[in-house]
Structures are given as structure tokens and as C-alpha cells.
Amino acid sequence: MGNCSYLMSEPCNHTSVPHYEVHADNENRFNKPTISYLKAVHVYVRGVKISILKGGTVQLNGINVNIPLTPATGVSVLKSGKHYTVAMDFGVTVRYDGNHYMDIKVIKDYKDKLCGLCGDYNGNSNDDFRKPDGSLTTNPNDFGHSWVTDPNCNKKPNTTIPGCTDDELDRYESSGYCGMLLDKNGPFAVCHPKVNPNSFFKDCLFDLCELDGAQPILCESIESYVNDCQDRGVTIGTWRNSTFCREYRSMLGSIPFQFQSFQKVNQILIPSVSH
């Protein structure tokens, strides 16, 4: 797809809850048009625009600023762990790691009142592919493109699908690669009852097939699952070692803009695919 900007989440036609908007910009890297990467997250709230750019630069109304920062009443911008965070006192929090992972957390007051790529938060995942005109689609690209906010963006769907040989697919499905997410005896099994690993596994396979099994991509696919597990209060045991994902590196990473599905876990709106 093109390097587009998207509306991720906002209250739609509801004045009973405080308004906010979250937009995201994506880009293609490494000459791989089938995979889109998060380039920037923009939060519009109480008359200000807060931007978190790839690499961790923070801007207020387009001007670079230092954090922590209170750009408006009840709005805080800070770094917590590896996440750059915009926290709003009415119960909305936006996080971005400056690389490949973002999420939006909202309180239950916003249930069934939201629009955007992160869905409506009504507890029914079957209607999350709802377009701005209210119609539903089953086509991921149609859904994603419907929320493009840049009218000059190239909306032509990319129909090229990455592929693996049978041997490569067997390797990436194994417990040494993406398969470790599904391993019932592995370090992530404790989280399976809370966060279904299937979509993370499929996205991991997609990315490794496209990027020739690059370990940084594998590590970040696993990190995405770990992040969601931690948000659900699940403690993951040691999964890194001296030869596997030894340390966190902000090298590569992807966020979905060829959308397949979304996870909405209680109060957390999380784009859940990575291609």
C-alpha cells in the first residue's frame, strides 16, 4: 500500500464522552511494499496535536519538545519503560514504542461509541470491519483504505502476497521460530487463556516469509504478543537468551495497514496484525 495516514480511533457522533483522535502514519521500508511500518502517531486532544515519531521524537503542534510534558489540562506526555505515552485524565491512554508497537486504552465509558481502525469497542469482533459510512466489509484492504485521512494517498491495494517454500514454512512454523508462540509447553503458554496467539503466529509467518526469516522481525513479533500478555496482567517467563533475541533493538518492526482483524481486550484497542 501507499504511505498513508489513518484514523485509528475517535468517539463517533457522541458528545457524552470527551473527544480525542488518534491518527497513524505508515511507511514502506526495505523496498517491501507488502509490509507497512508505523512511522508516527498523532494524538489530537483539547486543542493540541501531540506527535510521536519513529525513533522517539516528540512534537507539540509540529515543534520538537522534551518530555515529560503537560501540553494541556489533564494531558500528560511521558516515557514509561520503552513506551512513549500520552495519558488523558478522562480515561484514554495512547502508547507507541517509537518502532513497531502501539496501543490505545480506553475506559468502559467509551464502549460502543468509537470509530476507526481499532473498531467500535462493542464486544463484537464480527463488526469491526465497519467503514466510515457505516457499512461492513470483509475485505481487509477495503476496510483499511476506508479510514485513510490523506486524500492524496495512493489507495491502490497491493495484491502481491509474500510466499515461502515448503521448507521455509516448515522452519518458520517450528518452535524455534513463530511456532514458539503456540507451544503448549513453552514460555507463552501461560498467556494462551488470556490472549489467543493464533493471529500473532500468522502475522509472524507473514513477516518472516517476506523478510527471509530476519531474527529482529521474529523478536518483535514475539514482543508484540508479550506486550499484550503483560497488559492483561500475565507474567511471561524468560524467553530471551544469549543467542536468541538477546536484547531489545529498535531495528525493524511493522504495524498493520493491510488489516485482517483487531483485538479488543476489555479496555484495550490493539491493532493485531503486522502486515
Image: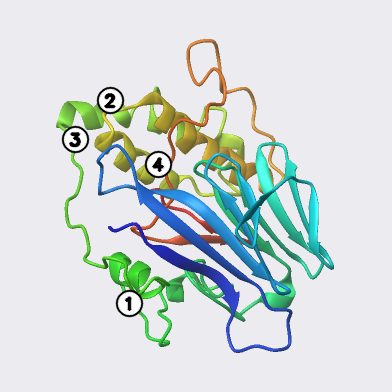
Residue 231 pos. (x, y %): 67, 48
Distance from Cα at disc 1 to Cα at disc 3: 28 Å
Crowd class of label 1 (few under 14; some 14 to 19; many from 20; radius 10 Å):
some
Depth check: give the residue in front, 45 or 131. Answer: 45
**What amino acid type should be assigned to the residue bearing mark 4?**
Phe
**Residue that badge 4 annotates:** 201
Secondary structure beneath dot 1 equals loop
Secondary structure beneath dot 3 equals loop
Distance from Cα at disc 1 to Cα at disc 2: 34 Å
Indicate which disc residue 171 carries. Answer: 2
Indicate which disc residue 164 carries. Answer: 3
**Residue that badge 1 annotates:** 137
Distance from Cα at disc 2 to Cα at disc 4: 13 Å
Secondary structure beneath dot 4 equals helix
Distance from Cα at disc 1 to Cα at disc 4: 24 Å
**What amino acid type should be assigned to the residue bearing mark 1?**
Thr
Depth check: give the residue in front, 143 or 230. Answer: 143
Query: Quadrant where the N terminus lies?
Result: bottom left
